[in-house]
Image (cartoon, rainbow, N blue to C red):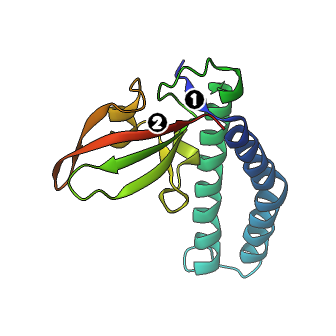
Amino acid sequence: MQRYPMTPQGHQALEEELKHLKTVERPRITAAIAEAREHGDLKENAEYHAAREQQGLSEARIRDIEAKLGGAEIIDISKLPQDGRVVFGVTVVIENLDTEEQKRYTIVGEDEADFKANKISINSPIARGLIGKTKGDDAKIQTPSGEVEYEIVDVIYA
């Protein structure tokens, strides 16, 4: 069984999304299909086909969330040894050694990742290059524009 690392907050968000899909979206889509059926010929009924497509996408998302929750490995950063190493759940401040630009990222599970909110997936190239390193270490990260070297400025266990 595949394991899906996630923070307690990420697990809670997935549970809430699943509940919403099952209790709000599923009944709404079922009602839309029923209403579209009442309009007659299903072959040329765009509303019916759109509702069925939406139903398929929603059910696929439900299955995906259920699988991830079933294989969830909830990692509570407050229960980990705080030895200064970059691990899942920490916030890390890095500095590009060429441009001296600093960035701050929190390493989270795939479903929690939000680049605009500075949350990166544990599977991202940046996170993979930082995991296991400590404050002061250098990390070479392969990016689409080439290799970039970063220094780990701080590791925050929050």
Q: Residues within 10 Å of mark 1 (few under 14, many from 20)?
A: many
Circle 1 sits in a helix, a strand or a loop, which is it? strand
C-alpha distance separating marks 1 and 2: 8 Å
Q: Amino acid at mark 2?
A: Ile
Residue 30 seen by the camera: yes
Residue 57's spot in the image, x, y percent? 58, 56
Q: In the figure, is residue 24 to the left or right of 140?
A: right
* Residue drawn at 41 percent across, 36 percent down: 123
| Residue 2 in picture, x, y percent from top left | 52, 22
**Res 25 label:** none
- Crowdedness near tag 2: few (<14), some (14–19) or many (≥20) residues, C-alpha within 10 Å: many
Give the quadrant of the N terminus.
top right
Contact between marks 1 and 2 (CB within 8 A): the answer is: yes
Which quadrant, please, contains the C terminus?
top right
**Of the pair 57 and 147, the residue shown nearer to us:** 147
What is the number of the mark on residue 122? 2
Q: Is residue 45 visible?
A: no
- SS for dot 2: loop
* x then y, percent, for residue 38: 77, 77
Q: Is residue 145 above or below residue 15?
A: below
Whichever of callouts 1 and 2 sits on the residue coming sooner in the sequence is: 1
Q: Which residue is mark 1?
A: 5
The amino acid marked with disc number 1 is Pro
Q: Quadrant of residue 138?
A: top left
Residue drawn at (65%, 26%) of the image = 75
At x 51%, y 55%, the residue is 118
Using the image as rendered, state which of residue 104 and residue 14 is in the foreground. 104
**In the image, residue 94 lies at what x, y percent?**
39, 46
Residue 64 found in image quarter: top right
